Image (tube, coloured by chain):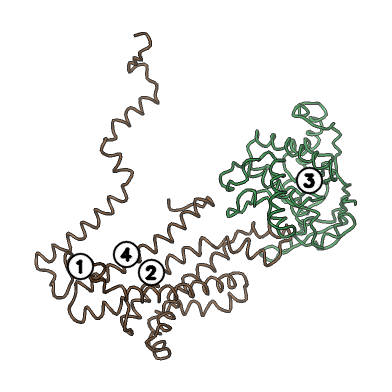
Chain colours: A brown, B green
Amino acid sequence: MSNSVTTSPADMDDASVSIAVVGRKLPRRGLFFHKNRRLFLGIAGVIVFVAVWQLLFVVGFLNPVLVGSPAGTLESLVNLLFVKGTIWPDVGASGLEFLLGFTFGVTIGIVLGLLIGRFRWLDEMSDPLVSAFYATPYVAFLPVIMLTFGISLTSKVIIVMWAVFFPVLINTIAGVKNTPREFLTLSQSFNTSKLRQFTEILWPSAIPYVLAGLRQAVGRGLVGVLVAELFFANNGIGFFISKASGSYRMNDAFAAIVITAVAGVALVRIVGFVENRLAVRWGLSTKG
Amino acid sequence: MSSGIVVDRVSIRYPDTSGQEVVALENVSLDIPTGEFVVLVGRSGCGKTSLLNAIDGLVSISSGEIRIGGRSTAEASHDRAMVFQSPRLLPWRRVIDNVAFGLEARVGKKAARERAAELLALVGLSGFERHWPHQLSGGMQQRVNLARALVVDPKVLLLDEPFSALDAFTREQMQDELLRVWRKQNEEQALTMIFVTHDIGEALYLADRVVVMSPRPGRVKEIIPVDLPRPREAAVRDTEEFQELAHRMRTLLEGDH
């Protein structure tokens, strides 16, 4: 018994006492919960939302002829995606429009943003135009675009480009302008060429801003796709929603909305993931 | 080839934000022979950093001329490099690529990295090549800052209060480290050092000569030769000679208000 550890409370130092107290406060079931807190509470939020949604039908506040119900929407989702699979061509059409418009719009936004951020005369020249176009809801240009390009892939790609271009442009400009002066004198001290200053200092310094712009652009781009298709299209998710609603297939319409929402969340999450990875690597302060 | 520095009646004037002319440096002349360690000391506003920046070609000179090895510093040249006050490590580059930065354009990425690895070893940071700058302590970041300047094999190294943000212990450690690196580099090719500080002890510990400057307008007040034996060790700070020089410098600097 000589080597058995017997510790009376009086022997404990402060540290072990405080550990003991914290240990008692932490309920055993809580450990798993606390690790996945965000996930569990997020799911709880969705469940509450769906419950309230269903409740509004039960009490007769919502009319199932005009609004999709949770159960009906789920059934439509399963049907459209898996059993019949009839929505895939529309998902594909919308996806293509988004992909092309997003790629072109973002590329042009980044390139112009870098130039405008770098050259002051370009900035001064473009500032009123950028402000005006950014402030104008781009839907105002829809009729013009449609008249010019017709109900085609081109017109929808242009609308998405337009939607994503400005947030990327404005963020890229801000990113270049906010390059720490210290880094510019550093590159000057090493006699860095103008081109290398662009590629090695200004561009990487702007990347976190560009990513913030991309995050905004994802949402705006999806709105662009839907708006374009709601008004002028013969395929795509927006067209599907419009057609389903027109024939009172509200559960189908809601299922398409859910698909759009999931796509939006997924895309924003992807950008957010890249942003966080970068922040950790580069040691940038983030929201946490 | 000589890399002696001649500062010939240099003045630097510029307008401040209200349009008033500021004289950062007035009629400063200085001869620094090849391989010497010169420390510029003075109160803020004495133009010591302006002079350093002018030697690096970062600010333009209003009148006079600075020549390194007979060539005017107005021409871009790779024979000098700056160790900045803040480490200024690029957060998007790993430690080794930060060090390689100044060399990449000239010799390519691969060769620059090889040289960078050697210099990281020289400043005692082997094994940290793949780290990101924010993962290093302040003292380690300043070592990277030093290695980055040395990577271009400069003949003149300019140091702008590089240790001022470090704690006292790390600062003294870095001073020893700097002297060691300087001695090592000097074996291959003479390396002239110009070091700016406002710390009297630091100035005396490092310098062959201390240039005491006075503010408004920036001028050279006195040049003090420091004949303490090299290599120097911490104990030199306790010698009577060191204390006397420190006292003399303090008296000189106290005159400026």
Check if mark 2's residue and mark 1's residue have beta carbons within 8 Å: no
Disc 4 designates what residue?
Answer: A262
* Residue located at (40% from left, 82% from top): A153
Placement of A115 over or under B172, stated as above or below? below
Residue B75: x %, y % from top left? 82, 63
What is the CA distance from the residue labelled 3 to the residue labelled 2? 56 Å
| Dots 3, 4 in contact, CB < 8 A | no
- Residue A208 rendering spot, x and y as whole percentages: 51, 60
- Examine the rendering and report whether any part of residue B250 can be seen: no
Q: Which sits earlier in the primary sequence, circle 2 or circle 4?
A: 2
Q: Determine crowd level at label 2: few under 14, some 14-19, many 20+ residues with C-alpha closer than 10 A.
A: some
Q: Amino acid at mark 3?
A: Leu
Q: Picture quarter containing residue A25?
A: top left
Q: Which residue is painted at 26% across and 54% down in the image?
A: A43
Asked if marks 2 and 4 fall on the same chain, the answer is yes
Q: Amino acid at mark 1?
A: Thr
Q: Are marks 3 and 4 on the same chain?
A: no
In the figure, B206 relative to A159: above or below? above
- Residue at 46% across, 63% down: A212
Q: CA distance from mark 3 to mark 4?
A: 63 Å
Between the residue at mark 2 and the residue at mark 1, the CA separation in whole angstroms equals 23 Å
* Same chain letter for marks 2 and 1: yes
**Which of the two marks, 2 or 4, is nearer to us in this view?**
4
- Mark 1, residue position: A73
